[in-house]
Image (cartoon, grey):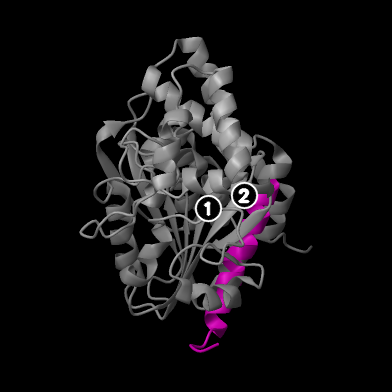
Amino acid sequence: MRRDTSLERILMANVSDHFAQDYAGARKKFQHAAREAGARLEEHLLPGFAGPCGEPLAMDVALHGDPAAARLVVVTSGTHGLEGQCGSGAQVALLADGDLHARMKAAGAALLLVHAVNPHGFAHGRRVNEDNVDVNRNALDFSLPRPVNRAYQELEGLLIPPTWPPSAENRAALDAFIRERGFAHYQAALTLGQYVSPQGMFFGGDRPSWSVVTLERVLRTHGQGRSGLAWLDIHTALGPRGHGEKIQAGDPSELSMARFLWGADVVSLSAGDSSSALITGAVLNMLGASCPDAHCAGIGLEYGTRPLPEVLDALRADHWMHRYRPDAPTTARLKAAIRAAFYDDSDDWRGMIVGQARTAVLQAAIGLAAWKPGD
């Protein structure tokens, strides 16, 4: 009688079982899957903060495979808080995938999973961290002058109006801006990152966040001694529903290696061919400095959910809610809409997440084994 492989068991199982409905459940699933797979677990507790029910918050790390492997594939989730619900499910599925583990071992690669880079945002259903900082705009050298986003400063008074839904006057003014400048300009102005308004949207902070400092330490520790390192940072909300766009957002010099690993459909923020506008302070910028002895490449794996205008309005509503503190029914309604903008609670969407994440990890492991500097 032919023995089922672990891959066959995964395919026959309900993929949605890998996903949880909240941070506490996701963390429990991740830790359990890591122990079942024989991975080495470590936790980095976020000091001074707790989850909605008083639970501790942490960035959890699981290393699977040979600790001394020449190559390392890193998968991070929850850089943008509530987007961790998607990334966590993918990570749990990767831990359960014995067939993938065998293929990675053959390629001489270990797997490093960093769960909940921004645990506070994940637990509290926000994209930003405990200080209203967008962690993916925070990986900067703060000893240098901050990037300037004048277009955001021009827009800010319209973005978080005193009432929600926005008044007809607010809508008309924002529509006039978009008509005059174009939606792409509006998206770029809003999402580039800004460093002057701590309570505003896409605030990049005034110092390195706990998440960035801790993640950099994790990368340095586990990247030490590797010859090659590939990093997948999982995100949601941009692009067609369920499609994982592969976005090279770090050092532009890594683009050729990224395309060698993941294919010609890797897009580049610096080239402007992505569904994402250019951003400042992306965490992928840390890769080369954290692992200077390894040949490195990283991409954001961005899964589409809802139309972009709906996503941006959900973010505006989130900031309005946290500025004006509405009543409980309004808060519950807005939280549900915000969650839906960043997580599709359906089996087919979750299946697409797991399948594409698995493919990207396998591509990275095989590609690292074949990569030669100068390719």
Magenta residue check for 371: yes
Q: Is residue 135 left or right of residue 241?
A: left
**Above/below status of 239 relative to 99:** above
- Where is residue 24? Give x, y as percent: 44, 34
The circle drawn on residue 263 is none
**Magenta residues, dominant SS class:** helix
Magenta residue check for 374: yes
Q: Is residue 145 left or right of residue 89?
A: left
- Where is residue 252? Give x, y as percent: 47, 72
Q: Dot 1: within a 10 Å radius of its alpha carbon, few (fewer than 14), some, or many (20 or more) residues?
A: many
- Where is residue 215? Give x, y as percent: 33, 56
Q: Which residue is mark 2?
A: 303
Residue 56 is drawn in which quadrant?
A: top left
- Closest to the observer, 173 or 142: 173
Q: Is residue 103 visible?
A: no
Q: Residue at x 31, y 60 (%)?
A: 216
Q: Say whether disc 2 or disc 1 marks the residue closer to the N-terminus.
A: 1
Q: Dot 2: within a 10 Å radius of its alpha carbon, few (fewer than 14), some, or many (20 or more) residues?
A: many
Q: What type is the residue that disc 1 sits on?
A: Ile
Q: Which residues are magenta?
A: 351-375
Q: Residue at x 39, y 44 (%)?
A: 134
Q: Residue at x 33, y 32 (%)?
A: 199
Residues at marks 2 and 1, CA–CA distance in whole angstroms? 8 Å
Q: Is residue 356 visible?
A: yes
Mark 2 touches mark 1? (CB < 8 Å): yes
The circle drawn on residue 234 is 1
Secondary element under disc 2, as helix, strand or loop, is strand
Secondary element under disc 1, as helix, strand or loop, is strand
Q: Is residue 239 left or right of residue 319?
A: right
Q: Residue furthest right?
A: 1
